[in-house]
Image: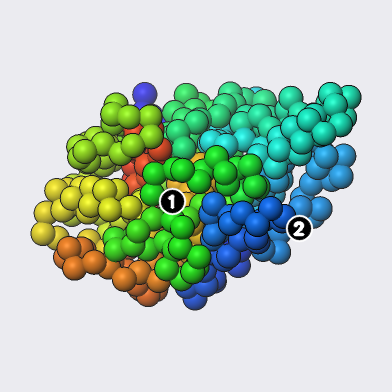
Amino acid sequence: MRASRAFITGLGVVAPTGVGTTEHWENSLRGASGIAALPEPGGGGHPAPVRTAGQVSGFDADAFVDSRLAVQTDRGTWMALAAARLALDDARLTPDQEFPFDLSVVTAAGSGGNAFGQREIQALWSQGPRKVSAYQSIGWFYAASTGQISIRHQLKGACGVLVSDGAGGIDALAQAHRLIRRRTGAVLVGGTEAPLSPYALVCQSDQYGISRDPDPRTAYRPFGGAGFVPGEGGAMLMVESEERVRRRGLRVYAEIRSTAATHDGWDPAEPPPDGTQLTRAVREALRRADCTPDDIDVVFADGAGTAVGDRQEADMIRAVFGGRPVPVTVPKTMTGRLCSGGASLDLAWAALALTHRVIPPSVNLDPAVEYADLDLVLSPREAPELHTALVVARGTGGFNAAAVLRGPAGAGTDTG
């Protein structure tokens, strides 16, 4: 029996580039960065350990989360609930009109409910255990977004959460693809993070490669900079089987051709001495997609922003594509690195690029001479022949992941 194909039919974005797909895409093409200075911590005269971050402005949680649920959950889950609602609406999917066991949700998570947990720990130490919320046990939990989305929309198929830091969005997509092949009809998949509370920033402050630069324009410059900045937000994607796409007469953003993952097996925090496993993940994704490197029209790079990470990714691009100048873009230069929300947002960017035949830009880049051979996309680039995209992601601890998406024109199904 032929394996069921999987298509992205809806997108929900809550990111420093905007809330909702339209605002996000318009700001992306304008190169409007959401990276800004963080507020100075109050009291003590101690400088902030992290000075800049990608921040979601104008997010009205009340528009997506009622007050009774808001007090039980963290900002990261509010964003996940909002992105899930936007993705469902975009796909014109009404869960209460569906068989609930045919619908699933899989999220990527890394840091959990930071602000919620910090608030309750402060209450514990300053006022005693009776002042700690009964919701502490679920509000901080890294699986909270999966659980709350499932409960809210009654998605009763196989659900889960993947924990692999920045690679998590692609790893979650891989699980969604597996569920579709096992005859699940539709899967909400993605991730959002809110790791900008004071405690969360302290936890990240000694992470390898984090930038101390206070200037939002220079703090994160992959392929020529000296570090990265964190950020909040992410995206949720609605993924449906080919049978559902045809039955519902849907237009699609892209087909999920393949995913692949490897692990460096080197160190819990430090990067490996070479990028062998990153290259292996990309080549495996191409093999599974039945693609050659010449079939790839754009690379959405991971963009570590560190000397070692950038060199390894550039070496991977050279090794896989040889001398071919494949366009390379790092639109997360407008958002910062969003932990488990980052790859999900890159997948949304790739799906939109394939739909609109425009490659979103990398901003504020000043590439070093050693990367002059890379075709870095520094302004929006129209690409009429844009059909297939490669998305690359890495996570702290040695996680590598890659995904191949094919646009509507090459997906082999009615786009509606």
Task: Report which residue position mark 2 lands on.
Answer: 60
Task: Report which residue position mark 1 lands on.
Answer: 210
Give residue 63's quadrant in the image.
Answer: bottom right
Give residue 228's quadrant in the image.
Answer: bottom left
Dot 1 or dot 2: first in sequence order is 2
Dot 2 falls on a residue whose secondary structure is loop
Measure the alpha-carbon separation of dots 1 and 2. 29 Å
Instruction: Work out whether residue 87 or residue 197 is closer to the camera in this orientation and state it.
Output: 197
Q: In percent of the image, x 38 and y 49: which residue is there?
A: 209
Give residue 368's quadrant in the image.
Answer: bottom left
Q: In percent of the image, x 74 and y 32: which residue is there?
A: 121
Residue 412 at x, y percent in the picture: 37, 49
Instruction: Work out whether residue 342 or residue 273 is closer to the camera in this orientation and state it.
Output: 273
Given the image, on which type of amino acid does mark 2 rest? Asp
Residue 140 at x, y percent in the picture: 68, 32
Please rate how many residues cluster around mark 1, counting C-alpha atoms within 10 Å: few if below 14, some from 14 to 19, many from 20: many
Please rate how many residues cluster around mark 2, counting C-alpha atoms within 10 Å: few if below 14, some from 14 to 19, many from 20: few
From the image, state whether disc 1 or disc 2 is nearer to you.
1
Is residue 199 rendered to the left or right of residue 124?
left
Is residue 356 rendered to the left or right of residue 247?
left
Q: Is residue 286 visible?
A: yes
The residue furthest left is 323
Given the image, on which type of amino acid does mark 1 rest? Ile
| Residue 307 sits above or below residue 285 on the image | below
Q: Is residue 389 visible?
A: no
